[in-house]
Amino acid sequence: MSSDAPVPSLADLRQEIDRIDETMHRLLMERGKIIDRLIAVKKTSESGSAFRPGREASMMRALAERHEGLLPLDTAEGIWRVIIATFTYVQAPYSVHADVSAGDAPVRDSARFHFGFTVPYVTHPSAAAVIEAVATSRGDLGIFRMDQGATSGAWWRSLAGPDRPKIIARLPFIERPDHPAGTPVFVISKPLADASLRDVVLYAAQFERWHKGANEALADLGGEVVASAADANGLSELIAVPGTLQPSDLQNALTKAGASLSQLVEVGSHAERFRVK
Ligand SMILES: O=C(O)C(=O)C[C@]1(C(=O)O)C=C[C@@H](O)C=C1
């Protein structure tokens, strides 16, 4: 604005804010009408689940890439998470189940940030209880902290099997060091036919013996161990690798590196991780 331009009054600026707020509200209501039409196209009532994590990951990525200005990215991301999660909920109601055996606060923050307050948040005393709640629901989600160490045991083992719930997303979609709800979590749901991206594929791997060289072999393949727990059968790991890698190549590389693998079962997949500074 040039120095001789008239300075707007506070009332003028508030009028602008009112206009923008009303436009945003009307646009949200218009979005709701599109969702209404989308329910029929997606046949959501047949599948019982409207969640499309691949689509959400690309929407959140586009939002981060276009974001600029005074409003923190945290806020823009939080607003859109609530919009998308709630529009998912109005298509087909669902609850988010969480294992709070290692504490409620971080996982509740994550659930509220990513799914809002309209979607019910249900706590459980164990990972097994979360998985069973999801397995017996119509379209509920479960969330698991990836940083809770061995307290929850090798929960990923009970995702093995064609009809068992599967990992369908990793949150937050937009990763950054000071994320306000940055606890990394996996989202599980009953298997989604047309919904999951396979940029990253997750395996439950059971080892009779682990060898530290296997970490290096895994890194060479672009993979990593994301969670690990010892149980009666040996060492159980949740391994993430690029979706382009064949399971036989993974198995061969780990065996060659000295880790004796007794079982390798796919337990889910998710979109490519996206990081901003
Ligand atoms: O694109 C869809 O399939 C939708 O249902 C719409 C929408 C959204 O609100 O944008 C909601 C749920 C899905 O997880 C992804 C996106």
Image (tube, rainbow, N blue to C red):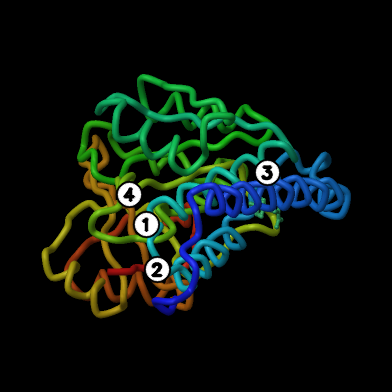
Q: Are marks 2 and 1 in contact (CB under 8 Å)?
A: no
Q: Which residue is mark 3?
A: 87
Depth check: give the residue in front, 25 or 73. Answer: 25
Residue neighbourhood size for the residue with mark 2, other residues' Cα within 10 Å, grouped as few (<14), some (14–19), many (≥20): some
Task: Tell me the CA gap for discs 3 and 4.
Answer: 23 Å
- Does residue 53 appear left or right of residue 41 in this picture? left
Q: Which label sits in the foreground, 2 or 1?
A: 1
Q: Earlier in the sequence, mark 3 or mark 4?
A: 3
Q: Which mark is residue 274?
A: 2
* Pointer 4 residue Cβ closer than 8 Å to ligand 1: no
Q: Secondary structure at mark 3?
A: helix
Q: Are marks 3 and 4 in contact (CB under 8 Å)?
A: no
Q: Which residue is mark 1?
A: 72
Task: Tell me the CA gap for discs 3 and 2.
Answer: 23 Å
Q: Earlier in the sequence, mark 3 or mark 1?
A: 1
Q: Which residue is mark 4?
A: 184
Name the residue: 42% across, 22% down. 123
